[in-house]
Image (cartoon, rainbow, N blue to C red):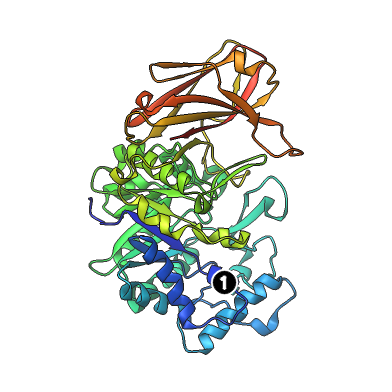
């Protein structure tokens, strides 16, 4: 293994624990939060202490329960429950961050802290109590940013990192964390939310952010590692002012997490990062809550072992050193506990061989981001007689395993079983085996899953090429799934 000996990293956010139960929280609930991750098999647990406020009694940043009595009516019941639970835990003498880090050591999982570098929760409501006084009192330091295509989050507001006061605001928090708390890894999370400079000119400020990362590195005590979450391509990072290659060349970071924002990107180019950062920097592939999501077809990473195993096997085949899990716990908001026991399965590429898994080409989740997250290969128009090639990373699989390939298409599917073919690498598969609706009746889109049958002998470890040929009416390919 490279420098940092972790295979599976789990990120725990600053508020989820406090909103997931109505019973009064105690320090034992914090312990349980850590235990389920450690018992599941993760190597490192990152505790996120902040959005715009912090969830522990800080001396330098406002905590969530400061000014609770001055609720302006902007908070909903969920917000009030979070604040009430946080204050209750603090009133019991429990420092949430300290307790979580301490419990990590007690149950033998490495402990780290993940700092969100510009979280934009609630910024569409300028008087929301979750926004810090620092944010609200300085509108001249706020940057508007295009975010979603509709709704209140169509435009968000983030702090402007061109301002030295903004950079010092975050350095102040990091100084406190690294001096007052004991942990192994500090993560600077630039992907929640990825907006730091004016959108059209952010690439002009890479050196400003590199200087900031340099200052963060100087604050770290000996033995503490620094890692950063960055977008799925080096170019997308530079568009945001995040030059991971420069950080690596100066040895400012020990690891990077390559990830999409609010969705799982399956066709990340880990190799491009490896060429730029070299072999001494650890590269983690980041998975999000959504495995895929498009017009009624959905896959949730935390509830699907096949998706988890497929993502891990694909990213290891693409050159990743480990797997990073973000927002895994969100399935509890849908009434189901995530599959913590599956985390340990993601540690070893060899142990993934022969286990059922799903490989995918499609991103999911938020629709209006500007971070270059992809998906890069779908959707794709497949007109008459023009084969469309798709490249997908696949892990090593035992010979003779049955493989089901699903091409999800939109369009006129009359005679599609006679008119469509696929090639897998050098093998011709022939006609489709079946066709079925890909979404429930009444969904906004009429999507069909065209199924082809193959074997694992047609696959190879690493990059695989799937060619889809359509000799009928034009179709649009919106997703490719390979089920081993």
Asked whether, in this view, residue 299 is left or right of residue 390, the answer is right
Q: Give the residue displayed 62% in from the left and 59% down from the top.
A: 334
Q: Is residue 272 visible?
A: yes
Q: Give the residue displayed 73% in from the left and 52% down from the top.
A: 151
Q: Position of residue 187 (x, y in %)?
A: 38, 61
Q: Position of residue 349 (x, y in %)?
A: 31, 44
Q: Is residue 161 visible?
A: no
Tell which of 51 and 325 is nearer to you.
Answer: 325
Badge 1 marks a residue whose secondary structure is helix
> How many numbered discs, if any?
1
Tell which of 222 and 23 is nearer to you.
Answer: 23
Above or below: residue 421 compared with residue 312: above
Residue pointed to by mark 1:
134
Above or below: residue 315 compared with residue 250: above
Q: Give the residue displayed 54% in from the left and 77% down from the top.
A: 62
Asked whether, in this view, residue 125 is left or right of residue 290, the answer is right
Please rate how many residues cluster around mark 1, counting C-alpha atoms within 10 Å: few if below 14, some from 14 to 19, many from 20.
some
Tell me which corner region of the image, top left, top right, bottom left or bottom right, holds residue 408: top right
Tell me which corner region of the image, top left, top right, bottom left or bottom right, holds residue 314: top left
Q: Give the residue displayed 38% in from the left and 34% down from the top.
A: 394
Q: Position of residue 319 (x, y in %)?
A: 32, 39
Above or below: residue 52 compared with residue 257: below
Tell which of 21 and 342 is nearer to you.
Answer: 342
Q: Position of residue 484 (x, y in %)?
A: 43, 35
Asked whether, in this view, residue 479 is left or right of residue 355, the answer is right
Tell me which corner region of the image, top left, top right, bottom left or bottom right, holds residue 128: bottom right
Q: Residue furthest bottom?
A: 92
């Amino acid at each position: 293994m490279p420098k940092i000996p972790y295979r599976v990293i789990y990120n725990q956010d600053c508020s989820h624990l406090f909103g997931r139960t109505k019973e009064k929280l105690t320090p034992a609930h914090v312990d349980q939060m850590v235990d389920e991750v450690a018992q599941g098999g993760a190597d490192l647990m990152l505790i996120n202490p902040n959005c715009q406020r912090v969830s522990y009694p800080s001396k330098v940043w406002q905590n969530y329960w400061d000014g609770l009595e001055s609720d302006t009516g902007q908070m909903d019941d969920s917000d009030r429950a979070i604040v009430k639970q946080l204050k209750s835990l603090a009133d019991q003498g429990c420092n949430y961050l300290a307790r979580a880090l301490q419990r990590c050591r007690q149950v033998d999982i490495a402990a780290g802290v993940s700092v969100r570098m510009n979280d934009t929760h609630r910024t569409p409501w300028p008087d929301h109590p979750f926004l810090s006084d620092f944010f609200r009192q300085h509108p001249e330091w706020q940057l508007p940013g295009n975010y979603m295509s509709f709704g209140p989050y169509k435009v968000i507001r983030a702090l402007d990192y061109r301002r030295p006061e903004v950079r010092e605001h975050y350095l102040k928090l990091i100084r406190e964390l690294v001096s007052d708390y004991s942990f192994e890894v500090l993560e600077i999370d630039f992907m929640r939310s990825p907006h730091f400079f004016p959108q059209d000119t952010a690439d002009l400020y890479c050196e400003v952010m590199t200087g900031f990362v340099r200052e963060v590195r100087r604050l770290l005590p000996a033995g503490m590692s620094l890692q950063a979450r960055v977008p799925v391509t080096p170019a997308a990072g530079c568009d945001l002012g995040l030059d991971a290659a420069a950080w690596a060349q100066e040895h400012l970071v020990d690891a990077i997490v390559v990830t999409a924002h609010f969705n799982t990107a399956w066709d990340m180019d880990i190799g491009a990062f490896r060429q730029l950062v070299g072999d001494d920097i650890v590269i983690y592939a980041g998975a999000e809550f959504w495995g895929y999501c498009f017009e009624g077809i959905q896959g949730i990473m935390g509830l699907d072992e096949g998706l988890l195993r497929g993502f891990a096997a694909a990213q290891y085949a693409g050159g990743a050193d480990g797997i990073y899990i973000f927002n895994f716990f969100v399935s509890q908001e849908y009434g189901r506990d995530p599959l913590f026991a599956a985390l340990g399965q993601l540690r070893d590429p060899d142990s993934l061989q022969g286990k059922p898994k799903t490989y995918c080409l499609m991103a999911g989740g938020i629709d209006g981001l500007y971070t270059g997250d992809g998906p890069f290969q779908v959707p794709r128009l497949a007109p008459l007689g023009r084969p469309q090639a798709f490249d997908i990373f696949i892990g090593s699989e035992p010979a003779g395993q049955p493989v089901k390939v699903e091409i999800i298409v939109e369009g006129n599917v009359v005679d599609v079983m006679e008119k469509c073919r696929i090639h897998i690498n050098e093998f011709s598969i022939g006609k489709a085996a079946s066709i079925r609706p890909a979404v429930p009746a009444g969904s906004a889109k009429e999507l069909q899953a065209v199924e082809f049958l193959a074997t694992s002998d047609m696959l190879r470890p690493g990059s695989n090429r799937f060619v889809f040929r359509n000799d009928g009416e034009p179709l649009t390919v919106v997703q490719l799934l390979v089920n081993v």
